[in-house]
Image (spheres, grey):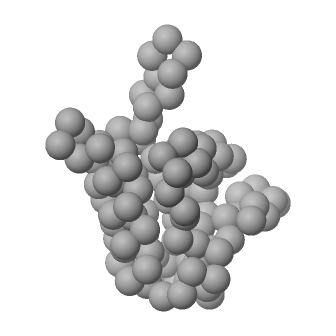
């Protein structure tokens, strides 16, 4: 399995949540040794759609979709936000499993 930890940087304004950047790192369990990383900021020139597509390209470079497991850096916060962003922008995520505190999201 390919293990990836994500961290979303967000800001909130008037009940709207905005993703300002996506950071991720591939790691080896159980040592937590990091291998490769990803980081992209959302801006006027680099829209969230573009960042999500870039994240998918990076994930594809790691291996097959069904072998990639996404872990949430924070307990249960980042994964649902990331999935909502993929859905809102009508982009298919490029990972097979999403894990968070004792829960498996497919």
Pick the quarter of the image with the N terminus: bottom right
Q: In the picture shown, does residue 3 fall above or below 1?
A: above
Q: Position of residue 72 (x, y in %)?
A: 60, 56
Q: In the picture shown, does residue 89 fall above or below 61?
A: above
Looking at the image, residue 52 sits to the left or right of residue 72; the answer is: left
Residue at x 32%, y 53% (from the top left corner): 50
Residue at the farthest top position = 14
Residue at x 44%, y 75% (from the top left corner): 59
Residue at the farthest front position = 90
* Residue 71 vs residue 15, the one in the foreground: 15
Res. 31 in view: no
Res. 1 in view: yes
* Residue 87 vs residue 38, the one in the foreground: 87
Find residue 96 and report its image quarter. Answer: bottom right
Residue at x 29%, y 44% (from the top left corner): 47
Q: Position of residue 53 (x, y in %)?
A: 38, 61
Q: In the picture shown, does residue 95 fall above or below 93?
A: below
Looking at the image, residue 3 sits to the left or right of residue 97; the answer is: left
* Residue 29 vs residue 94, the one in the foreground: 94
Residue at x 82%, y 60% (from the top left corner): 102
Looking at the image, residue 25 sits to the left or right of residue 96; the answer is: left
Residue at the farthest right position = 102
Q: Position of residue 39 (x, y in %)?
A: 31, 59
Pick the quarter of the image with the C terminus: bottom right
> Disc count in the image?
0
Q: Position of residue 27 (x, y in %)?
A: 49, 78
């Amino acid at each position: 399995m390919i293990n990836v930890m994500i961290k979303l940087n967000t800001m909130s304004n008037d009940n709207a949540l905005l993703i300002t950047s996506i950071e991720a790192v591939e790691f080896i369990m159980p040592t937590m040794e990091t291998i490769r990383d990803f980081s992209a900021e959302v801006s006027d020139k680099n829209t969230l759609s573009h960042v999500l597509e870039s994240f998918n390209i990076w994930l594809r470079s790691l291996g097959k979709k069904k072998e990639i497991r996404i872990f949430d850096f924070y307990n249960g916060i980042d994964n649902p936000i990331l999935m909502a962003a993929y859905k809102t922008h009508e982009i298919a995520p490029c990972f097979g499993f999403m894990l968070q505190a004792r829960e498996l999201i497919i």
